Image (cartoon, rainbow, N blue to C red):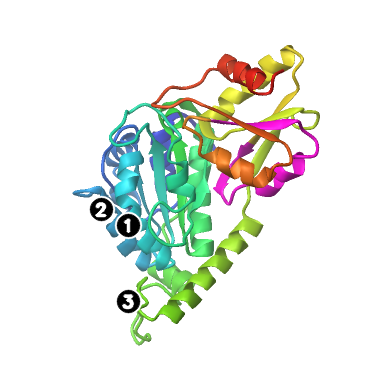
């Protein structure tokens, strides 16, 4: 029987990691995601499943421990908040360049710099455009509930291993700190060394004897060969874009206007839709679940049916750029956002819609 609990979003990240057979977590505390590590330390999974949990000396150390574990085919992860993820970017691009699977959780707070511990969505560029150097992508999942915080740990690992690519759960501080009912997954045993060898033996450093010498690296000094490798990565990203787009649509069938929002702002927009429709304004919502790959085609398909889109974000306007690229000038695109940890209200969003579209 499924186990149902009332849990905080950050707590359920930790609980699901244990249950889905995670081999190792390496992190460093930072608000508003510190409960991930705190929950793991309280649960002591090393006694239950053998999972390694380590507070590293820094964010840089943590991501490089993830790099090492991923090189061995292990199911490894880290979590942080916005400034901490910035510090991990070099390691993340190395992992992407070495084509290794791992899971990174980012519970966003306001910036730039140290900023505030309040919720934000201003890491969108950092997550979806490759915050480190080079032409690479993360698979980015944006939860809008505590249940999805759990579901996306499982899905994130699944996609990371399917494509040998880092995956990120990009949550905002609201989702990380809120409490909701969640249906927890059943326990999946950690893979044995034999199972890891079977799944990852062609690339992972499993220590098996008599294997051809294999080096995990993202280094290639010869320019033409590096270009060939980059072209291979781009083909992989096109495959991800073709097969892994996820999104949700609400009240778009008869909508004249469509909100595009993810995470907690998508939840707020649901109330805004109700308020707007009570005033006779037909509004719908398109919620990207994967921020990369972005649901470009579903947005483009709505262009001929609606009068305009409004991207609603807790930022100065980042996702709106992808909405505009999807629309390609075929209809009006507007933006409404709050910054610095300020969460918009449903009423503010409706007023912004009316003002920007002169309704």
Q: Which residue is mark 3?
A: 207
Q: 175 or 52: which is nearer to us? A: 175
Q: Who's the residue at 75% across and 30% down the image?
A: 307
Q: Is residue 3 visible?
A: no
Residue 63 colored magenta?
no
Q: Earlier in the sequence, mark 1 or mark 2?
A: 2
Q: CA distance from mark 3 to mark 1?
A: 27 Å
Q: Which residue is mark 1?
A: 90
Residue 191 pos. (x, y %): 42, 62
Element under label 2? helix
Image quadrant of residue 348?
top right
Q: Residue at the left extreme?
A: 57
Image quadrant of residue 346?
top right
Closer to the observer: label 1 or label 2? 1
Numbered label attached to residue 108:
none
Q: Who's the residue at 69% across and 19% down the image?
A: 358
Element under label 3? loop
Residue 187 pos. (x, y %): 47, 48
Q: Who's the residue at 70% across and 42% down the image?
A: 329
Residue 227 vs residue 254: left or right?
left
* Residues tagged 1 and 2 counted as in contact (Cβ below 8 A): yes
In the picture, the quarter occupied by the C terminus is: top right
Q: Earlier in the sequence, mark 2 or mark 3?
A: 2
Closer to the observer: label 3 or label 1? 1
Q: Image height check: is 44 above or below 198?
A: above
Q: Which residue is mark 2?
A: 60
Residue 350 vs residue 192: left or right?
right
Q: 41 or 301: which is nearer to us? A: 301
- Tell me where the magenta segment starts and ends, as one range: 287-312
Residue 295 colored magenta?
yes
């Amino acid at each position: 029987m499924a186990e149902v609990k009332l849990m905080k979003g950050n707590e359920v990240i930790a609980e699901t990691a244990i249950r889905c057979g995670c081999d190792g977590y390496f992190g460093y505390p930072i608000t508003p995601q510190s409960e991930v590590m705190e929950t793991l330390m309280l649960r002591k999974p090393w006694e239950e499943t053998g999972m390694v949990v380590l507070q590293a000396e820094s964010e840089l150390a943590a991501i490089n421990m993830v790099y090492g574990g991923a090189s061995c085919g292990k199911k490894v992860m880290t979590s942080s908040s916005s400034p901490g993820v910035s510090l991990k970017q070099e390691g993340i691009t190395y992992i992407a360049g070495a084509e290794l699977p791992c899971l990174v959780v980012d519970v966003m707070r306001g910036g730039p710099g140290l900023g505030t511990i309040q919720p934000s969505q201003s890491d969108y560029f950092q997550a979806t455009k490759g915050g480190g150097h080079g032409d690479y992508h993360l698979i980015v999942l944006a939860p809008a509930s505590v249940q999805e915080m759990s579901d996306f740990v499982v899905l994130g690992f699944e996609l990371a291993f399917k494509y040998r690519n880092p995956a990120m759960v990009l949550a905002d501080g609201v989702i990380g700190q809120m409490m909701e009912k969640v249906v927890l997954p059943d326990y999946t045993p950690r893979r044995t060394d034999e199972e890891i060898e079977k799944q990852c033996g062609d690339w992972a450093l499993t220590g098996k004897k008599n294997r051809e010498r294999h080096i995990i690296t993202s280094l290639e000094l010869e320019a033409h060969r590096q270009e060939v490798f980059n072209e291979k990565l781009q083909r992989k990203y096109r495959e991800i874009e073709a097969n892994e787009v996820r999104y949700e649509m609400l009240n778009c069938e008869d909508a004249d206007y469509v909100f595009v929002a993810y995470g907690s702002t998508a939840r707020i927009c649901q109330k805004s839709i109700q308020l707007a429709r009570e005033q006779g304004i037909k509004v719908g919502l398109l919620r990207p679940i994967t921020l990369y790959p972005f649901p470009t085609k579903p947005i483009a398909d709505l262009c001929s049916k609606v009068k305009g889109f409004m991207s609603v974000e807790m930022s100065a306007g980042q996702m709106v750029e992808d909405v505009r690229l999807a629309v390609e000038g075929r209809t009006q695109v507007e933006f409404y956002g709050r910054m610095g940890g300020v969460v918009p209200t449903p009423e503010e969003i409706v007023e912004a819609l009316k003002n920007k579209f002169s309704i």
